[in-house]
Image (spheres, rainbow, N blue to C red):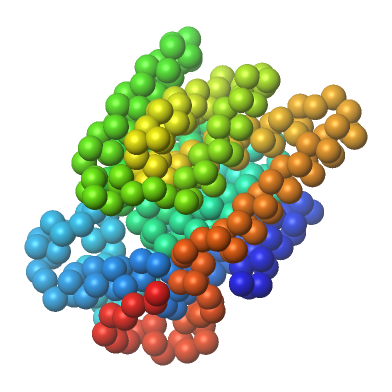
Amino acid sequence: MAVYLLLLILPAAWIVLPRSRAAALAVGAVLAIFIGLRDRVGGDWHAYWLIYERAKSLDAVSAMLLNDPAFMALNIAASRLGLGIAFVNLACAAILSAGLVAYARCQKLPWLALFIAIPVLVMVASMNSTRQATAVGLEMLAFAFYLRGRPRACGLALLFAFAFHWSAAVLLPFAALALLPPQRLRLAAWVAAGLGAVLVVAVWLRSDLRIFYQPSFGTAFRLLPSLSALAGLALLRLEQRERTVAYYLAGLAIACMAIWPAASMVTDRMGYYLIPLQMLVFPAIVTSLPTRGVRLAALAACLAWYLLMIAGWALLSSYASCMVPYRSYLQHPAAMFGSTPPQRVC
């Protein structure tokens, strides 16, 4: 388990050069390699290996119809080129890392935004839910484009997110929102969030109810920080584009809170898409406080909260056993090109 704690070195190192592009690239590269070159690590390892095997054995059209098209296209390309599942995972991890670092750089404290993403997005989602973690990476990339004034690139990234995991349909209303003129954004953000909320319910209804009515221990870890960010949002004066992103995600958070008692598993999975809200709000709160002492106290509280989440995951999560010991293809690079029968990790 100690190897996962080493990930906390990345935000600590980023403090030194928070706006350096080279430092951001280095952080992204380390994350991509750590996540993408894992070997037999994660609760969904067996399922993703089976997807790869089917992509290899079927013709391209049949394979594309089996699962989310962008993810299947990666598997088809890797299998046709004689590459292994490691290259699929590495490509997905590169997308996630690029989006995460790009979005973190848009925040008031990039290193803190990265720290906030590590417990749930990096340690849990990226290791267990490759497709959805990639969709979250594209969500963050889309928001980074939007905050930098590139609405068309934002919409395109959100479409790719939907192509990687169908649950990213909850983000599609923002693609239209991004194209609106500034004077209409506030009302439109809530309207679009309402449409996103409807899609949250649609995701719930589309899901296998036998699975998604089951209680999920991880829901509190996904949703409670976002609800805290939702409360903190009322205290902030954000720039217009930041408000639009925050209001949209706030609408999704409210929808998730509403369906939590009936479908905690759906709320658990939708909670991944709310991590950007935490990354935006908490650094903004810390930097907006009036005195240095108060800022340091708020920062310490934020760090303690997310460290507590890591401890809770390590001690209580049923998936923790699927991730220990951590193994990497870097230990045996030749296996990256091989194809062995699928095997269960846990």
Give left or right: position of 10 versus 123.
right
For residue 60, above or below residue 11: below
- What residue lies at 24% left-to-right and 68% top-to-bottom? 51
For residue 138, above or below residue 194: below
Count of marks placed on residues: 0
For residue 48, above or below residue 97: below
Residue 98 visible? The answer is no
Please state, as top left, top right, bottom left or bottom right, where the N terminus lies in the image. bottom right
Q: Position of residue 65 (x, y in %)?
A: 13, 56
- What residue lies at 31% left-to-right and 73% top-to-bottom? 46
Q: Position of residue 336 (x, y in %)?
A: 39, 82
Please state, as top left, top right, bottom left or bottom right, where the C terminus lies in the image. bottom left
- What residue lies at 75% left-to-right and 57% top-to-bottom? 12
Q: Position of residue 163 (x, y in %)?
A: 27, 48
Give left or right: position of 275 versus 268.
right
Residue 100 visible? The answer is yes
Closer to the camera in the image, 3 or 139: 3
**Displayed quadrant of residue 180:** top left
Closer to the camera in the image, 78 or 119: 119
**Displayed quadrant of residue 206:** top left
**Displayed quadrant of residue 173:** top left
- What residue lies at 69% left-to-right and 46% top-to-bottom? 305
Give left or right: position of 22 versus 289.
left
